[in-house]
Image (cartoon, grey):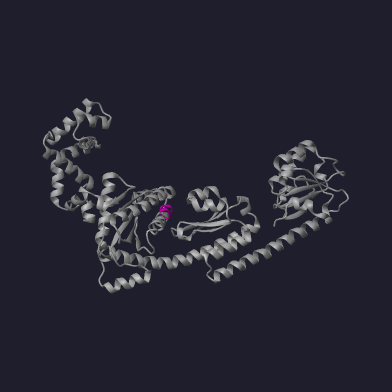
Amino acid sequence: MVVTVRDILNMPEFKGFRLLGGAGGLGREVLRTTVGDAPDCYKWSQGGEFVITSGYPFRDPENVEQLIRGCCESGTAALGIKLGRYIDRLPPQALALADKIGYPLISIPLEMPFAEILHPVQSRVISDQAHLLRYSSTVQKAFFDLNVQCASLEDLLETLRNFTHLNLALRCTESSFDRLCADAGPFREALASLPLPEVLKRYPWEKIALCGESASAWLVFDAEPSRLRESWNEIPITQAKGALLLFFQRWSSGAQVERRYRNEFVMDILMNNLRLKDEVWNRARSFGWDLGGAKKVVVCDIDDYKNRLTRAMAAGQGPAVLEESKGRIFAVCREFIGRMEKHVPYAEMSDSAAFILSSRGIFEEEQRQLECILTPMMEQIAAQTGFSVTVGVSGRCGDVFLCWKGYNQARTALELTRRTAGGNRIAWWNRMGAPRVLCTTLQNPAAREFVEAQLGPLLRCDAEKKEDTLRRTLETMIACNWSVKKSAAALGLHYNTLKYRWGKICSLLSEDFSSSESRFCAELALKMKQMDDFSEESLSDKFI
């Protein structure tokens, strides 16, 4: 415990001391005592001194305020003055200044020798420092023993709480490490219900970061920030952070090896790179996975992640922040999808994660249950990270050896949905309708030729003007059942404006769309264009 000016005034040896002003500074720490009888004695201050003076520097009233302000700004703890020899009382403006800046001015009895002040104060300071050193040694030994024993997170946090007597919690980007060490009350309720960003706004915290890792952890406390800086709390918190850092380093070393083998195994399944069935069952048992029976594949893909990463790198920001967000996203995905069943096989990729789930009941009912899991999962990801994810769900696969088909279905479903309707959605392969059939034709060169024959002049006209006005107009006409009036209303245009634009489209495509065949071909070509822009990295090349 630090020695403060208040402690000095409460010592029985100093019953004759009287506070003259600056009561707001009674909490200032005293580290040593010194005698200052020069008007500029504060210039030699090291900070923390209880300065005692005979009053000689106060003989000149013009120097009083400068001396008080100088002592305060140089970091001394307080100024003790013997009144009655060189000065009978301090001027009112000096006392007002002390109150304003919170710097204690103390009256010392004239008859008290300086030695009777220096020795008791220094003894008290040294005694408390020795006590603090013994306490620090006890704390260090406690956490050293825990480190040697490879103690659990619960033991580390409980030890920290025993030293600080504070309610606390550990929140981590890897949510499986979240721990709560607190009595029942508002703090416990808040930590159990609030997302991580809100928790860090509401409570003081200390961060534990692994260099080069996406995992980060925060020690969160139910206390005022000033209490964390008190020596009796700062020492165990510092030791606990070191112990937790070692814990996460041990976990990281083991997790990296396990993650590599797990990812390789799951990707072998999803890429149809399996050779012997016995090998599959043996590898599955090593991870505690049940790969028997029918399966379905769920792929969670982070929207626009690679573009944001490229922009961050170009701006010189580095990938650390985005990688941390990705780690949190994957952690949330594991947490929610893990509610469907225990020990779900999964693999993490650069911007997506794939999960293999059992599928043994009525498939439609399974989809409803999965939707109840995925919807709040996506909401939590958006709230905690600012990212959105598109989720692709495959149809039922007969067994684990057919999961490569399910993976292709889930990837194709989410890409088609993202291109035709945007991201942040659940894409169900079984509900894809016409796109599910059309995507199988996209790899055929005839598909590109068909789109060109039906829409080529229109698309080139839009491209020359760097807009998509004509294409959006045609899409709206189709959506409004080829009604000019309804399309004008949908686009917020005057009827004549839409009619003129429609005439231009018909002229470019040399078609009046009066027949059902011409309308069908235009709608089909637009749908195929939405599904695949036929660029070098087309959907057909990637998944079909």
Q: Based on the displayed image, in which of its 4 quarters is residue 464 positioned?
A: top left
What x and y, as percent, mark residue 161?
Answer: 60, 60
324 in the magenta segment: yes
Query: Vertical placement of 145 versus 233: above or below?
Result: below
Image quadrant where one finds the C terminus: bottom left
Residue in the picture at 15% in, 48% down: 447
Q: Name the one closer to the observer, 107 or 364.
A: 364
What x and y, as percent, mark residue 222?
Answer: 58, 52
Image quadrant where one finds the N terminus: bottom right
Please indicate whether residue 185 sits to the left or right of residue 529 in the image. Answer: right
What x and y, as percent, mark residue 393?
Answer: 29, 55
Query: Vertical placement of 343 versus 478: above or below?
Result: below
Whether residue 35 can be seen here: no
Specify start and end residues of the magenta stretch as a single range: 320-325
Name the main secondary structure of what is drawn in magenta: helix
What x and y, as percent, mark residue 43?
Answer: 71, 48
Residue in the picture at 71% in, 39% down: 100
